[in-house]
Image (cartoon, rainbow, N blue to C red):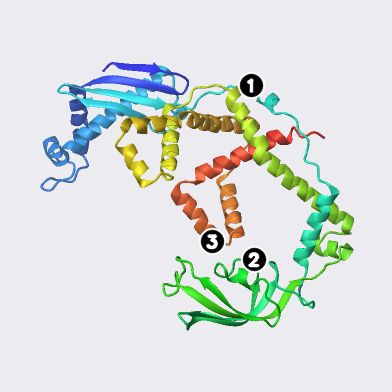
Amino acid sequence: MQIKTNKIDGANAEISVTVPKTTIVSNVEKIASELTKSAKIPGFRKGKVPASAVKKQYGERLVQDAEAEVLREVLNEGLKAMGIDNAAIIGEPQISKFERGDDKIEVEVKVAMRPEINMEGYAELVAEFDKPAISDEAVDTRIKELAQAQAPMVSVEEDRALVSGDTAKIDFEGFVDGEAFEGGKAEGFSLRLGSGQFIPGFEDQVIGMKKGEEKMIDVTFPENYNSEKLAGKPAQFKVKVHDILAKGEVALDDALAKKMLPGQEGADMAMLREKVKEQLESEALSKLYNEELKPNLLNTFVDKFDFALPSFVVEQEIDMALNKHAQSLAANEIEALKTDAEKLKALRESFRDDAARSVKATFIIDALAQAEGVRVAEQEVMQTIYFEALQMGQDPEAAYKMYQRSGYLPAIQMAMVEDKVLSKLLNNKIRA
């Protein structure tokens, strides 16, 4: 059995071999002999089963096991010949050819390896930059917003109409085809205008009403409304406004600072301004990182460093991009692609450059993380998912299990690694 190897580049290799049929037959005999000791076949005592009975019982499975054993041997010998360690292999080796003949089997196996990347000088590619400047006006505006959020709702004394942002205390009753419907009536209901709490059009027509005013409002229930009896139906609501509530005024003083900085000794407006400025700086820096500096830095690394990419990983990335694109196509466009192989091939190839850059970026991030000692543990991924789920009012455990079932956890972990390592590099370049 003559094994041929070809180390194409630093990330791809091929192993080919012609396996004589006698080798497969020999393996079948060996496996059958081993099974005679443990096989349970009716009519024979355990350990006393003849090889002929084992062959009859297991048939084609013995041949498959024999071929699999040959493939393992071919792979091990091929990797050894090329000096490739098993730890360097990415994914499962791909069997690109397996042709059975009368007296032989032609086999070709493609192997992908983790590329060796020379990232020498990467730190010098990170340019220095200034931290975003925060004006006094921006601090004042944020403090006023925070204070307004703390303000109590008070009844509006002046004679004015409702505006967006007000809370209207109303009675309402809904009718479809002139008949009142279940769940369509309430008294003393508090509705914050602009919240989108009611069906489209309702709040817009309440805006402009005054205390004591009554009127009929015409709306149409959405087609996807959760009641079949009401979905898509035109309706009328009789509405009466009893009161208008708006945010009261809050004094911008040390008392407010103490309320907004609980547990802070000596809290006053000067400390509040400093804390708010720090928060605004953090927000501005995060925006600068995410929208400009991080993408630009990663593109710089991708352009600067060159290395071989595992072919099958690039092909997988192309397939994912193609499938994502297909989701945006109309049925007739998809059908046209199915019947035109050349057009489909050309479309698929159009994603190759971006796919290669994406794969390259992934390996660069991995190399940078190793160089900078950055890692993200599974526990950290779980905590991040839990925190985001809680913020969105979702069940954190259910959210984590959903990502786990979908196989998204490695991608989330990699995104967190990317965020950490690029942030670390940029943090070192902020001008004092």
**Relative to residue 226, is residue 398 depicted above or below?**
above
**Which residue type carries mark 3?**
Asp
Identity of the residue drawn at 60% across and 66% down: 196
Q: Tell me if I can see residue 375 in this picture.
A: no
**Which residue type carries mark 2?**
Gly
Tag 2 residue: 194
Mark whose residue sits in front, 1 or 2: 2
Tag 3 residue: 395
Q: Which mark is residue 357?
A: none
Identity of the residue drawn at 60% across and 39% down: 417
Quadrant of the drawing holding the C terminus: top right
Give x and y (percent) for residue 277: 81, 49
Count of numbered labels shown in the rendering: 3
**Mark 1 residue crowding within 10 angstroms, few (<14) / some (14–19) / many (20+):** few
Answer with the quarter of the image where residue 97 lies.
top left
Using residue 218 as the reference point, say whether residue 8 is left or right of it.
left
SS type, badge 2: loop
Give x and y (percent) for residue 35: 21, 38
Report the front residue among 120 and 216: 216
Q: Which mark is residue 120?
A: 1
**Mark 2 residue crowding within 10 angstroms, few (<14) / some (14–19) / many (20+):** some
Q: Earlier in the sequence, mark 1 or mark 2?
A: 1
Give x and y (percent) for residue 406: 44, 49
User: What's the CA distance linking mark 2 and mark 3?
Assistant: 27 Å
Using residue 334 as the reference point, say whether residue 26 is left or right of it.
left
User: What's the CA distance linking mark 1 and mark 2?
Assistant: 55 Å
Q: Tell me if I can see residue 134 in this picture.
A: yes
Q: Earlier in the sequence, mark 2 or mark 3?
A: 2
Report the front residue among 111 and 279: 279
**Relative to residue 391, is residue 299 depicted above or below?**
above
**Which residue type carries mark 1?**
Glu
Identity of the residue drawn at 58% across and 33% down: 365
